Image: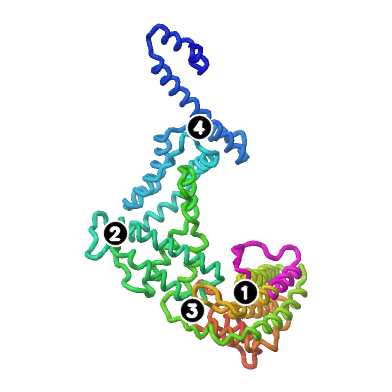
Amino acid sequence: MRSLRDLGIGLAAIRSVLHRERTVAETAAQWADALDAQIRTLQLQRAVLRAVAARGSAAEELPNMTELARLSARERRRIITDFVEDALDGVHAPAYRSGLLAAVPDLPDDPTPEQIGAWTELAALVREPELRAALRRLAEYSARTGPAAGEAPAAGETDPAGREQDAVRVAELMRLRGEEAVTAGLAPDSPAAEPLVAELVAAWLPTQAGIADPPAEDGPQARGRLLEQLETAAEPAVERYWQLLCTVTGRPAPPRWDTAGTWTAAALRAHPRPYELDRSAFDGTDPDRVMHAYVQVTRDVGALVAAVRPEDLGLPTPCAGWSVRQLLDHMVWENLMATSIAEDAPRGDHAADHLGDDHRAAFADSVRAALAAFTGSGMLHRTYGPYEAPGAMIVQQVVVELLAHGWDLARATGAPTGLAPEVAEETLAAARRIYGAAPRTEGSSFARERPAPPGAGAVDRLAAYLGRDPV
């Protein structure tokens, strides 16, 4: 019986074996079950402690975290069920509702600290009014646009399960294409974005079969409806909800949609109706002239930047309500982004601070880096992106941007606007060629063209062409 004692079995249980009241096998099974329960408890305690250490939780959070971790699967399901039922009360969206109720936070017996932390955050998130309102908006949209309950597919249509699979496939295509466009530095309102928008709309149209008044072809109705879908789905609280659920259950988290979704929505706003891409915008770009123009423009704009005093950084500018500091940050970003494209490592930190404490050095450094990348990478003689835009044209876009924003800076600080006179006319001609077919709509980089006064210089006319008021 020493072996049973060494395994941790109590004296009372050993006596029951000696008295032949229980067999060794029955006793071993009973104690193994008890050990399983103790192990699960210890594993849970360890996970909670690790989560507390990782999150830096305060003492007052400990009881709540421990209580939430100890809930049974039934109790966890009840929290989610009550939340969904309350958020969707009165909304007839059975498919959407069942999808939410099918996803329950099943913690494993041996949860990781990340899973405990995610479950704690999820339990707090479902009490937030913002998440409830967001889920309700999505459910109302589903009820408004989805097929009627019990409606059979028409001839030639896929069944609901097939439609769902198609929708997942199209969503993944949109995510990939949007991320590729961002990586390639393709502006959503660029003429080169139109074929990509047309491709996405063509892939999306079949998924609309079976809904009320489905769009039959690519056009304003189809693009408007797809934009509405994307804008409706852009709910950060809901995205966080699904990420936490996946972490709790150990399933792969869904791909993030923010980058691709933002780009695709902006492209749909800028291209509300189909039009044929004029590839002549890609032609006639002389790499040597482009480099010459870049040098001339950055020389004069750099002098403007160098003259900006710290007290000028808060001044308003003619550009999109930006201050001088925001304008300078964007100009530095233009150089950095073009440099990263040349180096085949496109940046994704558009919202970061690229100016730091020394705006003069930041701009000068970005110009030096761009010049080195343009000449050292062969960018001026390569093509980029799914529509093979010439690298020289990408640099020419930077020239247009810097000259236009140089005009903004000159107007903001009271400096003369006659910048880079050697290349201003050809830069204006390049802007007309590159952006001539681009719609001037909400979401575009430029407002509608404004009239330039008689005798206006090339840079003033460039500003007017890109939507500024040169008067």
Q: Residues within 10 Å of mark 3 (few under 14, many from 20)?
A: many
Q: What element carries label 2?
A: loop
In contact (CB < 8 Å): disc 1 and disc 2: no
Q: Which of 294 and 209 is in front in this view?
A: 294
Mark 4 or 2 closer to N-term?
4
Residue occupied by mark 4: 67
Q: How far apart are marks 3 and 2 (CA)?
A: 34 Å
Mark 3 or 1 closer to N-term?
1
Q: How far apart are marks 4 and 1 (CA)?
A: 54 Å
Query: Looking at numbered disc 4 in the image, what kind of residue is underneath it?
Result: Glu
Q: Which stretch appears magenta?
A: 342-371
* Corner quadrant of residue 455: bottom right
Could you tell me which residue is drawn at 55 percent across and 39 percent down?
Answer: 113
Residue occupied by mark 2: 147
Q: How far apart are marks 3 and 1 (CA)?
A: 18 Å
Percent x, y for residue 313? 72, 68
In contact (CB < 8 Å): disc 4 and disc 2: no
Mark 3 or 2 closer to N-term?
2
Could you tell me which residue is drawn at 66 percent across and 76 percent down?
Answer: 374
Task: Judge left or right: residue 89 versus residue 235.
Answer: left
In the depicted structure, whether residue 188 falls above or below residue 48: below
Which mark is nearer the camera, 1 or 2?
2
Query: Looking at numbered disc 3 in the image, what kind of residue is underneath it?
Result: Pro
Mark 1 or 2 closer to N-term?
2
How is colour applied across the structure in the image?
rainbow
In contact (CB < 8 Å): disc 4 and disc 3: no
In contact (CB < 8 Å): disc 3 and disc 2: no
Q: Residue furthest top?
A: 19
Query: Looking at numbered disc 2 in the image, what kind of residue is underneath it?
Result: Pro
Percent x, y for residue 450? 56, 84
Q: How far apart are marks 1 and 2 (CA)?
A: 45 Å
In the depicted structure, whether residue 396 falls above or below residue 224: below
